[in-house]
Amino acid sequence: MSLEKIRIDKRNLAGQCIAVVGGGPAGLVAAFELKKLGAEVEVFERNDHVGGRTRSETRGEFSFDVGALVLLPTYKNTVELLHELGLDKSLSRSKPSLGIVRDGKVCSFDYKRPLRSSLLNPILSWPSKLKVLKLLPILIRNWTRLNYQSMAGVCDFDNETTKDFCLRELNEEINDYLADPFIRINSLTGSDQAPFGEFLWLLRAYCAPFIYHLSEGMDSYAKGLAKHLAVHLNTTVANVEENDGVVKLLCGCGKSYDFDACVIAIPPLFARQLGNNPNGNHQPYFDSVEPVSVISVHIGLSFRPEITEALMLFPKCESEEIGAIIFEHNKGLGRAPIGKAAVTIQASREWSLLHAELSDAALIAALLRCAIPFIGDVRTAIEESFVTRWDYVCPVTYPGYFTLLQEFCESQPGNASVVYAGDFYSGGIEGATISGRRAAAKVAKYLEAKA
């Protein structure tokens, strides 16, 4: 749904008061669009910052994206809004190298020479490279259906794991060194968990000759939206109820507020705690959601390792501890001074769960030991270090998950006083952006009809 399709005469929403629960991209986009339509909008965010999982941190001379890592060329709605917000000056294109670890060595794929890299990359044997071509007819037939508007196109391939498909139709090598690391960096689970449809969707989403980079950090998108809005930080919403056309928000501090409509733009894991859904039953999807949790260690180094990759991906068969290593200084300009490095070591989901109780110092020491074979022993060169702990990154997916999600989406009314938004509707910042716009359209339609 494009921006033009949800624009309504501003006079239609003048004087209407709308609440948005959640200050991530989906909530902020919904609030931004509704404010443009003339509504009075208030955003309630439980954290001390906006952006949700599009979060960036600066420590000393080093900058890190500690949540979402990149913007893809397929993020058309997001890029459109970045231009509208005047953030296009900080938006640049880059063609980084990506490495996948095999047999303890890094096999590099260069975005600048994609065909050459694909042919010469030793990550897969030639028989496996030929077998991968079996995916092309499936992708071509479903190209337009694998999009950010809906995950309905994934449902046809939601009946088996990616690993099961690979072992049945391709081979173990393709599963281990292509499918598994690709899913680990995106969904943070693995090919033995994620359905095959999710892998197809990721291949479609990443089919582009470059990535976008925000020089001011990934959270500059959220900050650019928020500066136009009334945002209440450190404010938890405990309950949302609708009665006789009035939506009541009860905050954790005990205060309550009345609104004409509300957008709930927080993960389903938390949205299900806000009381009864006035627009119908959100079960069983909401109750089925389990969180993916992950721990990352971020270090600023006094020297720059001789590594050209921006992302280094680890198949589970190569490392059960590390999911990926991100070299921020190779991802884009301005992340570290010349000659220095900003590096993130992202633990695997399994390792994160097992070691969640460790102190930050212990986590840093443990993950650095695991990373030494790939980045060298950098422990004496650390100038800055910190840990990020995400209790929720995204939902755990499994065969049948997207079918359940689609049933939930189809059960939601086209216009309502309380609507949901979030990147769980489809993936990434683009999914959140589209979801926020769609939520704004539903609320606007409801308020027009009510008037």
Image (cartoon, rainbow, N blue to C red):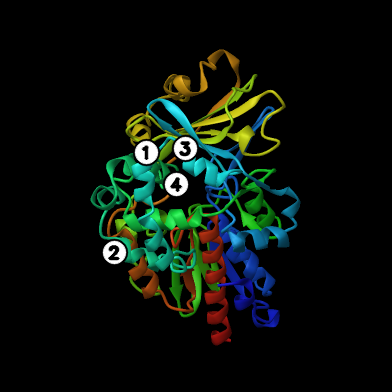
Q: Amino acid at mark 3?
A: Asn
Residue 418 visible in the displayed image: yes
Mark with earlier residue (2, 1): 1
Mark 1 crowd level (few <14, some 14–19, many ≥20, 10 Å Cα): some
- At a point 40% along the width and 58% down the height, the residue shown is 136
Quadrant holding the C terminus: bottom right
Q: CA distance from mark 2 to mark 1?
A: 43 Å
Q: Nearer the viewer, residue 430 or 221?
A: 430
Q: Pointer 4: what residue?
A: 186
Quadrant holding the N terminus: bottom right
Q: Pointer 1: what residue?
A: 125
Q: Pointer 3: what residue?
A: 121
Q: Is residue 184 left or right of residue 62?
A: left
Q: Amino acid at mark 1?
A: Ser
Q: Amino acid at mark 2?
A: Pro
CB within 8 Å, label 3 to label 1: no
Compared with 22, 121 (above or below) is above
CB within 8 Å, label 4 to label 3: no
Q: Nearer the viewer, residue 167 or 362?
A: 167
Where does the image place residue 199, in percent across and percent down from the top left?
A: 38, 53
- At a point 66% along the width and 24% down the height, the residue shown is 340
Q: Secondary structure at mark 1?
A: loop
Q: Amino acid at mark 4?
A: Asn
Q: Pointer 2: what residue?
A: 284
Q: CA distance from mark 2 to mark 4?
A: 25 Å
Q: Secondary structure at mark 2?
A: loop
Mark with earlier residue (1, 4): 1
Say how many tags the image has.
Answer: 4
